[in-house]
Amino acid sequence: MRRLALALAAMVLAVGCGVGTDSDIGERLEALAKRNANLEAENIKLRDQADRLQVELERKDASLKAEQEETQRLLAKLDEAVRPVEMERVVAAPKTEPAVEAKPATEPPPAPATTTAAPPSAAPQPEKRPEPVVVAKPPVPEKPAQPKEEKGAVVVAPVRTPEPRLVPAPLDVGREALVQPSPSPIPKPAPEFTQAPQPSAQRLDIAFAGVEEIVDGDVFKVRGQIQNNTPDPIREVAIMATFYDVAGKPVCSQSTMLRGGAAIAARRAEPFELTVTDASRIRRYKLRAH
């Protein structure tokens, strides 16, 4: 529209000045009219594109809002589904089976032996093999001897009278035959577990000396010295203390470092101090240096 106005103004000026003919003015007016029509068409197209873009933007905005609402709804459902499980995990404590104490293995009682055990002697006796037990059988009564007739004389054989003997019951005899008395085992002392020897670097190189405890209200301090037993200076030494309560559970730990130059000179000792709080719970502690 601005261009059209400028063109009309130029034509008016040309007519007023008497420049050009009527045919030239008509052609210019037609050209200006065509350009105006083209500009109007382009303007309409741009408006249509703007309207379409606006509609598309509104549609995308509505779709985005719908997706956000759906996401919020799904998150709400997920929260409702997950929350009871979390509460159950927190509230329900895992069941622990009671610990079964291991009972010492007991040896079966020895079977009763019918033989009398020999009195124990101080000196160990050589092992003797058990003698086979002879099962006594009931005596069979012997038939009276028949007199033998010889020529001219009658000889009467002596009759052997069986002596009365005690016959053990078959069950007792069988047990005695199966379970022979064996030499009583000599009890062996239980093995003693001793700590393996530590390397000389841990046993002799460094050692604690003059360790003392200081309790100031709720502050617990451990002071002492670390001794260098080697002929060479030690450049760096780490000292750590672990503190335990009455039940033997660790309460806290503290550490310090001796470093820089000759941290501990040869055959010399350097002081250290460790400080922790909650002294009322501390009942024992362990020091370690390396």
Image: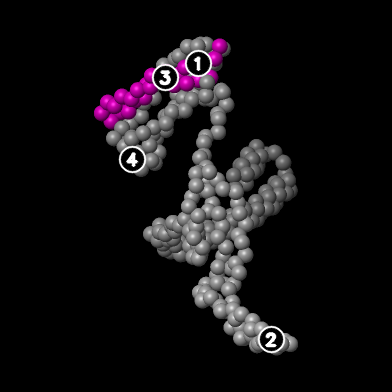
- Earlier residue among tags 3 and 2: 2
Tag 2: amino acid: Ala
Give the SS element for disc 4. Answer: loop
Question: Would you name the residue on which mark 4 appears?
Answer: 246
Q: Nearer the viewer, residue 10 or 123?
A: 123
Whether label 3 touches label 4, CB < 8 Å = no
Q: In screen coordinates, is 259 left or right of 133?
A: left
Q: Name the residue: 36% across, 24% down.
A: 222
**Residue 213 lies within the magenta run:** yes
- Residue 144: horizontal and vertical position, in percent? 61, 86
Outermost left residue: 217
Q: Name the residue: 54% across, 51% down.
A: 185
Magenta extent: 205-231
- Earlier residue among tags 3 and 4: 3
Vertical placement of residue 101 versus 22, above or below: below
Question: Would you name the residue on which mark 3 appears?
Answer: 209
